Image (spheres, rainbow, N blue to C red):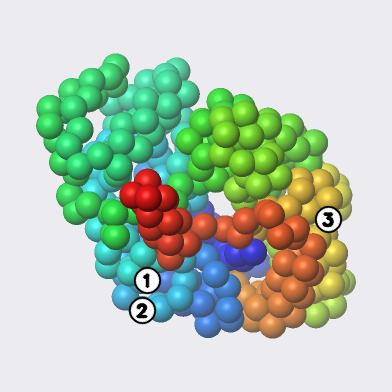
Amino acid sequence: MQFGIFTVGDVTTDPTTGEAPSEYERIKAMVRIALKAEEVGLDVFATGEHHNPPFVPSSPTTMLGYIAAQTSKLILSTSTTLITTNDPVKIAEDFAMLQHLADGRVDLMMGRGNTGPVYPWFGKDIRQGIPLAIENYHLLHRLWREDVVSWSGKFRTPLQEFTSTPRPLDGVPPFVWHGSIRSPEIAEQAAYYGDGFFANHIFWPKEHFQALINLYRERYEHYGHGKADQAIVGLGGQVFLRPKSQDAVREFRPYFDNAPVYGHGPSLEEFTEQTPLTVGSPQEVIDKTLSFREHFGDYQRQLFLMDHAGLPLKTVLEQLDLLGEHVIPVLRKELDALRPAHVPEAPTHASLVSAASVSSSEVTV
């Protein structure tokens, strides 16, 4: 079981001080948070991709390459890479380069994004979001697996005997998760390729994501990648931790009430009841996270959002200390003990290289 954090990289005013970090301060804070994640024993750090204020992570591979140079174990990922507005050729090259620099500690999450104006900025039509996601990923999948690609499609110029460079490390592409909060077509796409499906259930009730994950599992088995319960599932979540629950609620409430994503809507109590948000003690976070398995089955990756809504860096680092010391060891032990032997762990570069080697040997024999 992999545990980690993801960031959307928002620059938000702290409602308790009226101050907002500069872009420089926010970018440096994201790096510090990633380094802290490795320090406290987390497995994954993932950054979003945004091209509009108030967000700063417009170049995820630049940031992840910088973090790779300062870490040794942390898996570096995205949450998400915009498969709709990025050129598949550039994605293939950028992430293969990052894969080499990070010694394989790289995977990525594909998504359509949630900001409509981005599409025309990159010459795309938002009404073609799903077709763009399907066609662009089909090309990316080939670019990483075929040394020479000739291709034509609807949304970009054709390729004639093109080779993407560098080639994936050890001949094995980065593992891909397909992230979605609402689109069954993306769950179908993940199942078709045998990739991972990441349900970022941070806003809506569990029933919505149960439907998406169940669809993905059923179609994963349909396409012959394994049994439904062997499908590779990741989940999002949000937490705010303090040793005492009442302190957590008191401290987080002004951030919740004023957050751009959910402020001035449902109350904190209503939101925590209806979504995965947990504001409380380490034991409360443990209890609610363990309930995810009951709702969605055995899964491979859990990422938490912890650094948004204007929370100061000091507070985020304190959260990570609590998460790493009091929460993750218990969750790791409990969930690993519950997972049946036939349900795989989350893929890593090493496991994918090993599987490719076994497959090659079987073909040779």
Q: Are marks 3 and 1 in contact (CB under 8 Å)?
A: no
Looking at the rendered structure, which numbered label has been put on residue 70? Answer: 2
Indicate the secondary structure of the residue bearing disc 2: loop
Residue occupying the point 51% across, 42% down: 195
Q: Position of residue 146 (x, y in %)?
A: 25, 39
Q: Gap between marks 2 and 1, in whole Å?
A: 5 Å
Mark 3, residue position: 291
Residue occupying the point 43% across, 56% down: 358
Q: Amino acid at mark 1?
A: Ile
Pick the quarter of the image with the N terminus.
bottom right
The crowd level at tag 3 (other Cα within 10 Å; few <14, some 14-19, many 20+) is few
Q: Nearer the viewer, residue 285 or 216?
A: 216
> Which one is closest to the eye, mark 3 or mark 1?
3
Q: Nearer the viewer, residue 121 or 81?
A: 81
Q: Amino acid at mark 3?
A: Ser
Mark 1, residue position: 67
